[in-house]
Image (cartoon, rainbow, N blue to C red):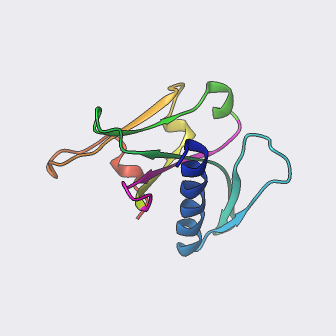
Amino acid sequence: MNSNEIGKIGELIGIIELMKKGYNVYRPIDDSGVDYIILKDSVYNRIQIRTSKLLINKNCYQFHFTTEELNKWDLFVCVCLSDNNTLGCIYIIPKENLDVMSTVSIHKVTDKTKESKWDKFLFT
């Protein structure tokens, strides 16, 4: 399976999970760098969805974006896929928490006593 196919799977899984949590999901007509617009409790947010499988050699999921892209959306949705392309977990990170970083690395924590700096953005 190529990276475009994996990205589409992650995007669809992300949308389904948002809808299950009561979000209305809308797709923009033009490709302006925003994947979807979501609405919940009368609040609209522009989102960018990225997908990653576990990078075994780094024991983490990595999500990339450019600083130009960062100005186009409100929330960065990181979909972590398991080995069989099913949902592992989702993180929804407000752009204010990304600064100008161009990579989000979410480490797979096997020790439950340790906390990742991204844990507070875990979408459950």
Residue 36: quarter of image: bottom right
* Residue farthest to the right, as pictured: 29
> How many discs mark residues in the rendered view?
0
The span picked out in magenta is 72-86
Foreground residue among 97 and 85: 85
Foreground residue among 70 and 64: 64
The image shows residue 11 at horizontal and vertical percentages of 59, 55
Foreground residue among 56 and 36: 56
Residue at image point 30% right, 39% down: 56
The quadrant of the rendering that contains the C terminus is bottom left
Q: Is residue 109 above or below residue 85?
A: above
The image shows residue 75 at horizontal and vertical percentages of 59, 47
Foreground residue among 1 and 18: 1
Question: Per the image, is 85 magenta?
Answer: yes
Residue at image point 60% right, 63% down: 15
Residue 79 left/right relative to 38 = left
The image shows residue 62 at horizontal and vertical percentages of 43, 37
Residue at image point 43% right, 59% down: 123
Q: Is residue 85 above or below residue 22?
A: above
Question: Per the image, is 62 magenta?
Answer: no
Residue 35 left/right relative to 3 = right
* Residue farthest to the front, as pictured: 1
Q: Is residue 80 above or below residue 41?
A: above
